[in-house]
Image (tube, rainbow, N blue to C red):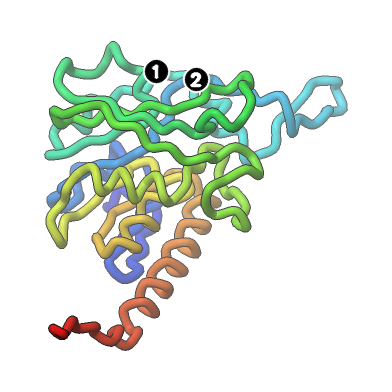
Amino acid sequence: MNPWKRKEVIGEATLYLGDCLEILPTLPKVDAVIADPPYGIDYVPQYGKRRMPDGSWRLPETQMRVIGDKLPFNPTPFFCFPQVMLWGANHFFSRLPDVGRLLVWDKRCGVIPERTQSDCEIAWHNRKGATRIFRHVWDGMLRDSECDVSRVHPTQKPIALMRWCIEQCNLTPGSIILDPYAGSFTVAVAAAQMGFPSISIEIEPRYFEIGIERIANAQRQEKLFDDRPPAPLQEDFPI
């Protein structure tokens, strides 16, 4: 019996609905894991709550998964992969090996006033190297990209950031990228735009459906780009 509830293949993207820890042993060889896992922050935003009949406050359904993340994230099942990049690393530093480097996403870039949320987010990459910073404003309606796109997930990140993450891995053509906590499926969208095959796993059916739509759109856009006639070549002639 398959460990997943549903499987969809869209171009070079494979999507699984189910628990990633149950599905991982069944996957083919994967070259890189790039993920924004749930890491137990028990995040409760100060907006969007609803007053219930008993007087208590309840969050919209889209926030409930984040609220439920009270258990510490265990990164060890992913250490066996050749490359691993996990966001939210500052929340589980004690569980990470000593090797590796940090990647920082500066999402306010000094132009957004300080707020209760962090100015940046941190990822751990299991490769040796210098710490790198990606500066890209992404704060509410103030964004350097995707300005006309609504968020579909409470922890959604910009496609530009995930493209940068893939570039940091220096992968060879045809390398397979795995996102075991797909959420908004931004890693898979970035992979499709860059021509890499991907595997995405998501446990929530509503996000799985959103992922199908986002990846299908990304694949169509990539095909349109590939089908464009080649640009005319410009040659320099000696005068």
Is label 2 in contact with label 1 (beta carbons under 8 Å)? yes
Q: Where is residue 115, by image quadrant?
A: top right
Q: Indicate the secondary structure of the residue bearing disc 2.
A: loop
Callout 1 amino acid: His
Q: How far across and down, in percent of the image, does residue 201 sit?
A: 36, 48
At 41% from the left edge and 50% from the top edge, which residue is drawn? 160
Q: Indicate the secondary structure of the residue bearing disc 1.
A: helix
Q: Label 1, on which residue?
A: 91
At 52% from the left edge and 39% from the top edge, which residue is drawn? 137
Callout 2 amino acid: Ile
Q: Nearer the viewer, residue 99 or 54?
A: 99
Identify whether 52 is placed above or below 156.
above
Q: How far across and down, in percent of the image, does residue 10 sit?
A: 35, 68
Q: How far across and down, in percent of the image, does residue 22 sit?
A: 28, 40
At 22% from the left edge and 25% from the top edge, which residue is drawn? 101
Q: Label 2, on which residue?
A: 41
